Image (cartoon, rainbow, N blue to C red):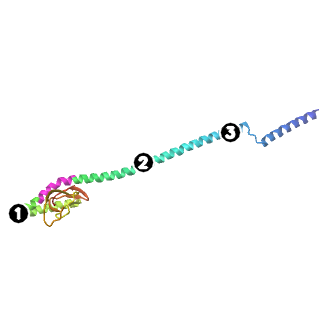
Amino acid sequence: MAKSKEKAEETLKEEEVNAEMSVSDEKIPSEEQSENERAEAILLAKAEKELAELKKALAETEDRYLRTLAEYDNFKKRTVREKEELYFASKSDVIKKLLPVFDNFERAQMFSDGEEYKKGVDMIVHQFFEILSSMEVRKIAETGDPFDPMFHEAVFREEKEGVPENTVTEVLQNGYAVGDKVIRHAMVKVSG
C-alpha cells in the first residue's frame, strides 16, 4: 500500500504541474499582470496629458517671445525716430533764436556808410552763415523763385511786367531749412 500511496501522490503532482502548464499556455492574464497593465495605461495617459500641456505652454511661450521681439523692434524704431525729432526740434529752437541777430546784421550791412563798419559786419555775417551752414542750415528763398507755400509766406502781392504770376519778386526776410524741414518760412513779395 505504501507504493500505491506514493504513486497516487506522484500522479497528483503531475496533474497539478500539467494544469499550471495549460493555464500559462493559454496566456490568461493573472490578476497581478492586469494590475500592472492598468498602472502602465494610467501612467501613459498622464504622460500624454503632461506632454500636451507642455506643448501648449511651449506654444504660448513662443508666442509671447515673438510678440516681445516685435515690440522691442518697434520700440527701437520709435526711439530712433523720437531722437531724430528731438534733435531737429532742439536744433531748430537754437537757430530760431539766432536768426533775428543774423537778420539785423544783414540789415546793417545794407545801410551802413563807413567802409570799416561794413567790412566788420560783412565778416560777422560771413562767420555766422558758416556756422549755420555747418549745422546744415540753408536759405530757402531767392528772388525769381516760383512761390511755394511750403517754404514762402507771401506778405505782399504786386504787379510787375515781364514777371510770371506767382513768382517771388523780393525776399523781405530770409527763410531757412535744415534738410527738407522748414525752420522759418521766408517772407516774400509775390507777383500776381
Per the image, label 2 sits on a secondary structure element best described as helix
In the picture, the disc for residue 68 is: 2
Q: Main secondary structure of the magenta part?
A: helix
Q: Residue at x 83, y 40 (%)?
A: 18
How many C-alpha atoms fall within 10 Å of the one at disc 3: few (<14), some, or many (≥20)? few
Could you say which is closer to the camera, residue 110 or residue 157?
Answer: 157
Residue 176 sits in quarter: bottom left
**Magenta-highlighted residues:** 93-106
User: x, y (%) of residue 32?
Assistant: 71, 37
Q: Look at label 3 and name its amino acid.
A: Asn
In the picture, the disc for residue 114 is: 1
Answer whether residue 99 is magenta in the image: yes
Q: Is residue 41 above or below residue 140?
A: above
Per the image, label 1 sits on a secondary structure element best described as loop
Comes first in the chain, label 2 or label 3: 3
Mark 1 and mark 3: span between their CA atoms?
115 Å
In the picture, the disc for residue 36 is: 3
Residue 111 sits in quarter: bottom left
Q: Look at label 2 and name its amino acid.
A: Thr
